[in-house]
Amino acid sequence: MIKFKYTIILILFLAGVVISGCTGGYSFTGADIAANIKTVQINYFPNQASLVQPNLSNVFTETLKDKFLSQTNLELVSYDGDLVFEGVITNYTVNAQAFQGNETAALNRLTITVKVKYTNNLEPAKSFETSFSRYSDFDSKTSLSSVENDLIQEISTELVTDIFNKAVANW
């Protein structure tokens, strides 16, 4: 009986050593970040679209920061990050969609496009520069101002998910 207890303790101890020795890129969020990457720098994304919505830059930038803080163990830094995100909002448009027989639109579409430069200072081959675009439709009988804040948050969340997946999830 005593020998059995010692065997169980030894097995648990060895399992703990093996598990604690495992470092690397697996996480339940899908992020695949090398163990030597410790910091992320997310610069402010200014709105350079022809139609400027005052809160968009702030909402987008903060949503991107929140994603990395909640989904990774990376420390957010102001400069010299292992991973660096910078860019601009290049498009913010509202267009009519789904025309009906009487030539009135049933839906309007808000589209946001963001140009992102991602620099991985420790694994430069994983760096990229690309544009991401997402949209959301809303009823044409509804004024943009009444749904704009919700749409901006929704689209920003989708854009950030796309950026996160391309940068660190290897999707």
Image (spheres, helix red, strand yellow):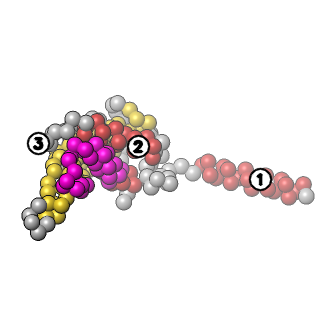
Q: Disc 2 marks which amino acid?
A: Phe
Residue 151 appears in view: yes
Tag 3 residue: 50
Residue 127 appears in view: no
Identify the secondary structure beneath mark 1: helix
Tag 1 residue: 10
| Depicted 96 relative to depicted 48: above or below | below
Q: Residue at x 44, y 55 (%)?
A: 30
Task: Mark 2 or mark 3: name the one nearer the start of the chain.
Answer: 3
Of the 4 image quadrants, the one containing the C terminus is: bottom left
Frontmost residue, 93 versus 21? 93
Magenta span contains residue 136: yes
Q: Disc 3 marks which amino acid?
A: Ser
User: Residue 21: x, y in percent?
Assistant: 60, 49
Separation of marks 1 and 3 at Cα, in angstroms: 66 Å
Could you tell me if the residues under marks 1 and 2 are in contact, i.e. CB atoms within 8 Å?
no
